[in-house]
Amino acid sequence: MAEKKFELTNLVTGKKSVAEVKSGTLGPDVLNIASLGKDHGLFTFDPGFMATAACESKITFIDGDEGVLLHRGIPIEQLAEKSNFLEVAYLLINGELPTGEQSAEFTNAIGHHTMINESLLRFFNGFQYNAHPMAMLSGVVASMSAFYHDSMDINNPRHREIFAHRIIAKIPTIAAAAYKHSLGQPFVYPRNDLDYGSNLLHMFFAVPCEPYHIDPVTAQALDLLFILHADHEQNASTSTVRLAGSTGANPYAAISAGISALWGPAHGGANEAVLAMLEQIGTVENVPKYLAKAKDKNDNFRLMGFGHRVYKNFDPRATIIRAMCHKVLAKLGKSDNPLFELALRLEEIALKDDYFVERKLYPNVDFYSGIIYSAIGIPPSMFTVMFAIARTVGWVAHWQEMISDPAMKISRPRQLYTGAGKRNYVEVGKR
Ligand code: CMC
């Protein structure tokens, strides 16, 4: 392939330089501006990273205009139909689908790390019963660095692999402990004879005083939701994990940073916010009033679960989840779910509205996920925790990719300084 170049000219001084254009396998080319400072004494200015590729990656590809999402090249629709969450986890982390033997080994490795240290369990007593579970999750995951600090050499590939197994295995256990703590119920230990989703349901919903029967429809729905949330290239929380991890920080601490970033309503917190919004809207008759609020620049109400930084078309995950809502609600005998009816009508009305059409605002992954979580008994405060459990796999894959790259550098953005110029300190009596 011919080498691509880009000429940059300073229109004031006339100074010219040539920048390299890098091409990926798919997607637009990127301009390598690393020499801009040396050649022109300039940095680029791109608040919110609207136009910046922060790294090279082989894990996930999104074509936002076409609504395409590929993990290691495989379309999300195929993974959703044919795969399972742990297989997708293996694919994201290792780059290839596992053979039968590799899959069994991986599942076994995850199964052998599901318990958490009893001391870690006692951390929950330090939280109020009404603490948000995302706060507990982020705090307790960060604390894991205290338990595995000495056995975690980030330059040792085997240590990194054990870290991956540990965090993927333990995050549902920690999430369930947070949930049980909020209810005041006893913690339920993991069961390694169960698959990933069924074990999570067992730890969430079993109680010591009666048997708990795992509903296969519910377990299947959870597994599918986890596949759909597993990775999404350089989103805010993944970039946070990369940035924190780039300092050489303990990876549990980096994952905890990612959990904190995910919590915000513009990111993973949107699934909880969507349900609250649907309840607030209440009936189809109120939809025009709330759409008007969403369009009003003086009103901070936004249509939660709508819009995406990358997708300017249907989010393929939302399309899968919408179809899944119909199936799961029917199988659970909850087809007449009024919030789902409202969400469908809201989508229909918004997609005909010029404001949403012009800005290419479509439902995203969070628009319908809360409806399924609710139907399978997960309370709204735990929705983003569910997202965090699934996204842990993506965070691990990206952290691994970054750390194993010999060219890794600490992430250190620059700034456009607009504060005061240099000035002298003024003694307190003279201010
Ligand atoms: N409701 C109303 N207007 C919206 C919405 C919305 N949900 N989203 C974007 N807009 C408008 C926005 O006001 C702006 O209009 P204008 O050009 O007139 O100023 C235009 O659309 C572009 O929006 P933006 O905020 O500049 O776009 P962004 O790429 O910075 O933000 C977003 C993307 C996802 C944060 C935003 O669409 C949003 O806040 N959506 C609601 C929250 C949400 O559902 N988040 C989940 C995202 S997907 C899952 C995940 O990442 O975890």
Image: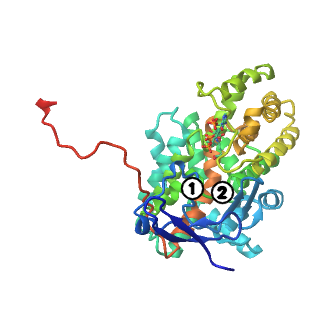
Q: Position of residue 123 (x, y in %)?
A: 45, 45
Q: Quadrant of the C terminus?
A: top left
Question: Is residue 66 found left or right of 425 in the rendered image?
Answer: right
Q: Which mark is residue 231?
A: 2
Question: Residue drawn at (52%, 73%), measured in percent from left and top?
Answer: 405
Q: Is residue 413 left or right of residue 331?
A: left
Query: In the image, what residue type sits under mark 1?
Result: Thr
Whether 187 is drawn above or below 153: the answer is above
Residue 228 is situated, as x and y percent measured from the top left of the image, at: 73, 53
Amino acid bearing label 2: Asp
Report the image quarter containing ligand 1: top right
- At mark 2, the secondary structure is loop
Which residue is most to the bottom? 1
Residue closer to the observer: 87 or 286: 286
Residue 51 drawn at (x, y percent)? 58, 55
Label number found at residue 238: 1
Q: Is residue 100 visible?
A: yes
Q: Which one is in front, 16 or 289?
A: 16
Dot 1 and dot 2 residues touching (CB under 8 Å): yes
Give me the C-alpha separation between circle 1 and circle 2: 9 Å
Q: Residue at 47% x, 34% y: name it.
A: 128
The residue located at (57%, 56%) in the rendering is 238
